[in-house]
Structure formats: structure tokens, C-alpha cells
Image (cartoon, rainbow, N blue to C red):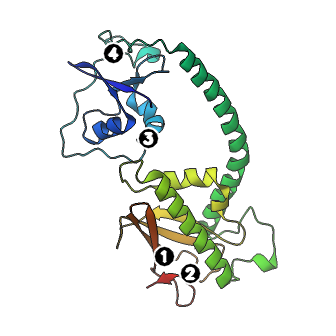
Amino acid sequence: MTDWYYHAPGQGRVGPLTADEMRACYRERKIARDTLAWHDGLREWQPLERLIEELGLTGVQPDMSRPPPPPPMRPAAATASHAARPSAPVEPPPSNRTGCIIAVIVVGIIGLFLIGILAAIALPAYNDYVKRSRAAQSGQADPTTPANPTMRDDAYDAGRMEKTDALARDLLTDTMREFYAANGNVCPDTFEFERMMVRYTRYQGDEDGWFSVDPARPLSGVCAYAVRFHGLGPEVKDRTVQYDVTVADDEITVYCRNIDLPAGFAPPRCGA
């Protein structure tokens, strides 16, 4: 478990804290994005905004009813490379875990190598997904799909719709399971869904149909998303269904509501 510290003006170093306690401090506005933070393995104190991903603050919203934290103390004449250092000497806590640091560096290098390989595989597919979505929204032909009379946008097929609906449900379920509790019960946004699509390219769909996801106002449950299907026929183009998501312990339930699809063209498991 990583021990976190942050610097509070007039108080000095605060910690050690767990990642959950740091996120709680962020929600309670005890710390902000410009608060200086540190953990074992960092060479120097960093503004919290540089550690958003590592700390899991994506999607965590501060409670605006609470007063903001005092601004961090910074040197009067800081250069760009030292702008994150506090004006008063604030040294990271001493550590003799040199071996652990070396191990972390080695693991980090290996991780970057693997991420590079995954990105080389996933990003081209994700770029194709973005091109298809933009083409569908603008009414243009899909630039990534060769002409094929059996795969035309005007050939609606209930089986293709059912397959694409199941894929959208899987994406919502897996993204909620990974991000909802980890971000303090905050609903995932478009960024989290795109991250899952990059990581697992099957969620991007194919020439048989794909979809786009945008946050919506819940009609039931805790989170809701407007989903538009693409490549499935003109009857459903630019039409919307809404998925309301309920979380109970470890069980995630997705309920589909037909918003404006014509009768007979909604997913089979989608109610009114």
C-alpha cells in the first residue's frame, strides 16, 4: 500500500494517508489540484493535478458547499522546472527502501513497454471507431468499411441490433464495475468509456454495428446514458435509447428505455 503525503500551508507535511483518504480529502476540499503531494518513488513534490490518474481522482467531484483549501505556498521566483516546490523547505519523509524504489522503476519500464505494445494494437482500431462515429453523425459513408451491399446502413436486421445492444450493456456493466466505486460512487463519464474501448477493442463494434455513449439524466437507478446506434439502418440513425444503471452491492443491473426509436426497431430487451 502506498503512503501519500500532502503539504498544507501553515501546517506542513500531512500524512501518511491512503489513496482513499486522499480522495476523501479532495472531495472535502481539504486539498485541491494545486496542492503539493508526494509518495515514495517520486523525486520531488508534485501538484495534485499531475497525479490525477495515479491517485484515481478521475470523476471525483469536490463538495462545493465546503470552503476551499488555502492556496499552496510557492517560491517568489520559481522557474518552470521548479514551480511545484514549496517556498518553505518541505522534504519528503526519509526512506531506506532503495531496493523497493529500484524494483518500482524496473516494473515501470516494463509496464511502459507493454503499454506501448497494447497502444500500437488498440489505438488504430479506436481511431477507426471514432471515424465511423463521426461519419454516422454527419450522414457520410463509413470511411473504414469497404463497399458491401450486404452490410449497407439501410439494411436493418434485428439480430445485428441485439448483438450491438448486448455489447453496449457489457461496456456499461464493466465500466461501472471498474470505475464507479473506485471514484467514490461517481458515475463514469465519456472519458472512462473511451478508455475501456481503447483497452478492449471489442467494445468498438464492427461493420455489423457500433454505438456511442453519452451521460444522461437518470430516470431510475444511479447512472444513466444515452446510446445511439450506428451502421444499423436509417430507421435507428440519430435515434436514442437510454440505459439506466442500478448498483446493489456487487450486482449491476442495466435497464433499457426506448426514447425515440420507431416501434419494432428498438433492441429486444428495451422497454418503453
* Image quarter (top left, top right, bottom left or bottom right) of the N terminus: top left
**In the displayed structure, would residue 256 be above or below residue 60?**
below
Q: Name the residue under label 4.
A: 86
Graded by Cα atoms within 10 Å as few (under 14), some (14 to 19) or many (20 or more), the crowding at tag 2 reads many
- At label 4, the amino acid type is Pro
How far is mark 1 from mark 2, CA to CA? 9 Å
Kindly check if marks 1 and 2 are in contact, taking CB atoms under 8 A apart as contact: yes
Please identify, in this view, whether the residue under mark 4 or under mark 3 is nearer the observer: 3
- At label 3, the amino acid type is Gly
Q: Which type of secondary structure does the marked residue at label 4 adopt?
A: loop
Please identify, in this view, whether the residue under mark 1 or under mark 3 is nearer the observer: 3
Q: Quadrant of residue 217?
A: bottom left
Residue 6: % across, % down? 33, 25
Residue 162 lies left or right of residue 16; in this view the side is right
**In the displayed structure, would residue 196 be above or below residue 81?**
below
Q: Residue 267 carries which label?
A: 2
Q: Which type of secondary structure does the marked residue at label 3 adopt?
A: loop
Q: Mark 1 points at which residue?
A: 241
- Which residue appears at 52% of the width and 90% of the height? 263
